[in-house]
Image (cartoon, rainbow, N blue to C red):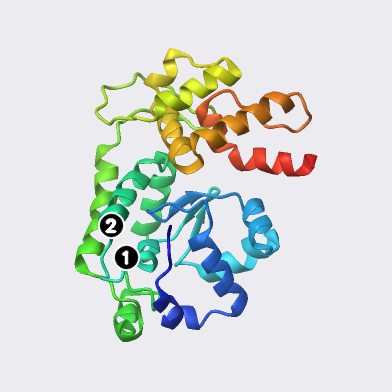
Amino acid sequence: MRSVDTRFWKDSWVRKLNALDRYAFLYFMTNTHTTWCGVYELDLSMAAFESGIDERDLMNTIIPRLSPKLIYVDNWIYIPNWQRYHMSGSGNLSPQQQKGLVEAWKLVPSKIMAQIKAIEEKGIPSIEGIGGVSASASASASASTISESDDSRGLAIKEKDMWYKNQEEDVVDYDSGEIVEPVKPRTRKYPNAPEIRKIFQEVLGKNPASWNQHKTQLLACENLYTERTPAKVRSALLYYQANREEKYCPQISSPYDLDSKWTKLGEFKLKQV
């Protein structure tokens, strides 16, 4: 279970939001797609369906007003201070939260991480206090903002830095999800990938050995296992198998396809009801 620190409502930046923006920001922090690093995939049509806010309003007015506390990049949400709103009462991340933070960063695609890094390098604050837009404004408002320990701040920075350094230099075609240059030896483990691959074998009859050599497919397996659960993956594939010939049904032939098209498959299912 995840909870939001009750001091959220006393934060100076939050108090300046209008009611709709405050509700939208709270939705983006607490919906079922979120991860512990504050970076997660979310199609705005699904956000509109779940929150009840018009998709055009989200894109054209609300998300721009929530910047830089919320960034929308290629169907991915980035909330720089996400962890701070979900800390334990001590003001530090619990061991379980720290573990979740480490694992969550591993599941963010390289393409999205590169864009986030570019945004941060342009000066948009990500670790500064949540009470203002700039570092100086944050400092002046520190008395009324949620406190953040140096340990927690250091952990967030350290995990992102480690993520950048640990990425293999594979070149990936993000349209197909395939690696287009030889795979280098890898040290990272993907313990849950075999179970997801087994489900693809049982339902779709697909489980090529090449999936075990592709970082994109392995990461997708891990994300499907942790964020969707094997039971939901099986259910989604069974639904896809029964409806794959229907018009507008998204085509799925690999873990990467299912992970990246999960929202589209859900929208297709809703339209068939």
Q: Is residue 31 left or right of residue 8?
A: right
2 vs 1, front mark = 2
Residue corresponding to mark 2: 156
How many numbered discs sit on the rendered protein? Answer: 2
Q: Position of residue 231 (x, y in %)?
A: 54, 34
Name the residue: 41% across, 80% down. Answer: 11
Residue corresponding to mark 1: 127
Where 79 falls versus 201 (above or below)?
A: below
Where 106 falls versus 78 (above or below)?
A: above
Circle 1: residue type? Ile
Q: Contact (CB < 8 A) between labels 2 and 1?
A: yes
How far is mark 2 from mark 1, CA to CA?
Answer: 8 Å
Confirm whether residue 251 shows in the render: no
Q: Position of residue 202 (x, y in %)?
A: 55, 18
Name the residue: 29% across, 49% down. Answer: 99
Q: Position of residue 151 (x, y in %)?
A: 20, 63
Q: Quadrant of the N terminus?
A: bottom left
Q: Position of residue 273 (x, y in %)?
A: 79, 42
Q: Within 10 angstroms of label 1, few (less than 14), some, or many (20 or more) residues?
A: some
Foreground of the two, 7 or 106: 7
Quadrant assignment, res 200: top right
